[in-house]
Image (cartoon, rainbow, N blue to C red):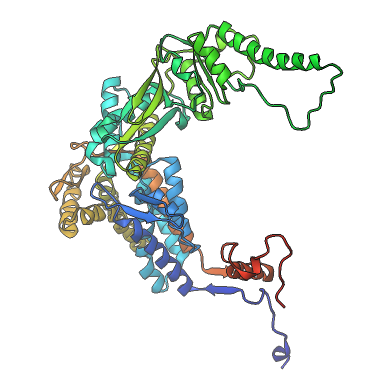
Amino acid sequence: MASMMQPQIILLKEGTDTSQGKPQLISNINACMAVADVVRTTLGPRGMDKLIHDEKGNTTISNDGATIMKLLDIIHPAAKILVDIAKSQDSEVGDGTTTVVLLAGEFLKEAKPFIEDGVHSQNLIRSYRTASHLAIEKVKELAVSIEGKSLEEKKNLLAKCAATTLSSKLIGGEKEFFASMVVDAVLAIGNDDRLNMIGMKKVPGGNMRDSFLVNGVAFKKTFSYAGFEQQPKKFENPKILLLNIELELKSEKENAEIRLSDPLQYQSIVDAEWNIIYDKLDKCVKSGAKVVLSRLAIGDLATQYFADRDIFCAGRVTEEDLQRVAAASGGTVQTTVNNIIDEVLGTCELFEESQVGNERFNIFSGCPSGRTATIVLRGGADQFIEEAERSLHDAIMIVRRALKNSTVVAGGGAIDMEISRYLRQHARTIAGKSQLFINSYAKALEVIPRQLCDNAGFDATDVLNKLRQKHALPSGEGAPYGVDINTGGIADSFANFVWEPAVVKINAINAATEAACLVLSVDETIKNPKSESAQGEAAAGAMGGRGRGGAAFRGRGRGMRSWA
């Protein structure tokens, strides 16, 4: 009787939405599978592109997993995890973003029947973690080192890695051309870790093959004043002065006040202003610099002054470009023109201004430090050049990783099939349910070669059976065999130079397993209701309609009309 009299316990605010248990877990798995299905068709050399149109009217065409995931406005809390792993793969390795989302989706798909049959998700998580650890060890064992090779051989190997990455992009048709360009750019910056030392400039027009690499810095001609055209546009071994100050007459602040007793004193104030700017310009000239660049404006007076003395100047150079010129030429950005010594001036073999398409570019080449490079991209549509830039970013990241980690594995689904075979074999040595779970993990890894076949229009079942048979050979000679995109059969990926850095695979397996385990470990979702004030604001916003046109928002500061 006493138990019947107990009051009801209200724990959460009224209107809180909670869902828990098995249905909640299944719902999360379905959401993640739906996200994986969006990027599924973009995998591989025959992958399709996605055209994404946002509310601002911007159109993006891409088949880069991370770009697509960022542009999809996913609101499902569990599915957002897949967006995060795609972003982390992009920032850590640069490539394999579609792979990581696909793997995570497939691990969850394989786990779903077990969850429906009542298996506890912690059992699955434990087995998945074990399988991922075994898979990563196997990748490290199968990886081939490119260390100790001569520079020429190394360049060749790195170009193969870059070509594998580019083959699945829009610019795949010109992958050899761009692969060698990317390798040269990465080798130019040496051990410098800063990615912004490789600049990319986009110039619409021309075709892809008109793109070129500058071993130095190139940037668009900045805004210029009268007198600019009289300046020389080409120098050999010039000294370069980099400034972060304005070289123009400044109008006084509105609240400045000067009291004069004699009208003649006014002239001395005007003269002082002119003397200050002339003094600055004179010091720039005396430094011996032939090229003067400044982050702030260089006015018409200064432009004409420099032109008369055969000096080239450019104002309003972006921070990034100025820093790259400083790194390449060995100069230092100055915040004053006093005491300019030779050590702070940069130099380069050749400075010239040349025409690229409709734009004029200032190009610094043959820089002594040489720790920077610029890729000038040409192409038809703006969207195309944008996608080419994203593709090259992936290739640059891959080449940097391959240089640092210097081990590669066979691509084209070969490594995935080999790990899958190894895990199936290992699963047979385990007693208990774990055998089934590790087996399902092994099956999930086959999604990569299967999807490569589907996207190329081949019979996936047929190709996968051939691959399984080849990888099952006891001699182990089938390990490097993957999907042959050109013939629809199977081929030795190593012999065909379809390589990828081992770190890409390791990172993808790690991130995908972590994401799958995270989704599997959630058994309850609680959605807090919006507070009443927030609901009131939302309702008012709906009435007002983008802040104009709604009756509630008329008046614009003349006191708002209240509706009782």
* Quadrant (top left/top right/bottom left/bottom right) for the C terminus: bottom right
Q: Residue at x 74, y 64 (%)?
A: 559
Q: Which of 65 and 490 is in front in this view?
A: 65
Residue lying farthest to the right in this orientation: 261
* Residue in the image at 68% along x and 64% along y: 555
What is the x, y in percent for residue 126?
44, 58
Counting every numbered tag in the picture gives 0
Q: Which residue is drawn at 40% across and 11% down?
A: 349
| Residue 373 placement (x, y as % from top left) | 40, 25
Can you say whether 402 is above or below 331 in the image? below
Vertical arrangement, residue 513 with respect to residue 114, above or below: above
Report if residue 533 is visible in the image.
yes
The residue furthest front is 263
- Left or right for 41, reference 191: left
Q: In this view, does 1 lie above or below 193?
A: below
In the image: residue 94, left or right of residue 246: left
